[in-house]
Amino acid sequence: MENILSQFNADNLDIKLTSEKLFINTAASSEAFALRSVNGIGVVDLIDEYNKALTAWKTVRLNQKIFLVTGITIGIIGLWTMQYSVGTGFGNIFFGGIFAIIALIAKNKTNNEPKLMSAVRIMMSGGNRDFQFDKTGIKSGNVAEFVAKVESTLTAYHKNND
């Protein structure tokens, strides 16, 4: 095993730098990149994905509020119509309750607001590879140091091997 020059850990991402390779382990895969094939490395925020997820989340939350207000309104109408027709009043209360219950169940399933994720981007001549992590995590604070170490190692490697 080669000597590890630098290492970065965040959530489900583990990256190790040696003098010859970059080893990347995620929850789904384990890969190794030879430094000769790596042109650069950087950190990017995945803002487009976050904006899409946030828009979808806000839409779902708005629909939940509409269902809840509709259910409460139908329930109130049911209470009001009970004075004229008990069956119609109970029917309205029942359907209003169904709307409200659906809204509350859906709210519990989509309670977590989306997070802005970041990615370590490995730039190679064949294209870029992104490895996602949560930059707000406690262990992700040293990503800038790690990227700087990889860049300096890449510079030294390419200078020595040209």
Image (cartoon, rainbow, N blue to C red):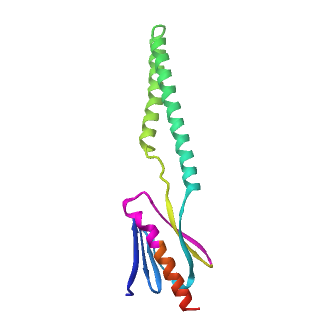
Q: Identify which residue, 11 or 143, lies in the foreground.
A: 143
Q: Nearer the viewer, residue 1 or 82?
A: 1
* 133 w.r.t. 33: above or below: above
Q: Nearer the viewer, residue 96 or 56?
A: 56
Place of residue 136 in the rendered image (x, y in percent of width and height, measured from the top left): 43, 57
Q: Specify the quadrant that holds the C terminus.
A: bottom right
Residue 48 in view, yes or no: yes
Image spot of residue 38 (x, y percent): 55, 80
Q: Residue at x 41, y 41 (%)?
A: 108
Q: Position of residue 91 (x, y in %)?
A: 47, 20
Q: Quadrant of residue 6?
A: bottom left
For the point 47% across and 12% down, the residue is 80
Residue visible at 55% across and 92% down? 161
Residue 12 visible in the picture: no
Viewer-proximal residue among 81 and 61: 61
The N terminus lies in which quarter of the figure? bottom left
Is 35 in the magenta?
no
As drawn, the residue found furthest toward the bottom would be 161
Determine the residue positioned at 48% across, 74% down: 148
Apparent side of residue 88 relative to residue 6 in the rendered image (left or right): right
Q: Which residues are magenta?
A: 126-146
Q: Does the segment drawn in magenta span residue 143?
A: yes
Give the number of callouts: 0
Question: Residue 5, how many percent across, how many down?
Answer: 40, 81
Placement of 39 over or under 98, stated as above or below: below
Placement of 121 over or under 136, stated as above or below: below
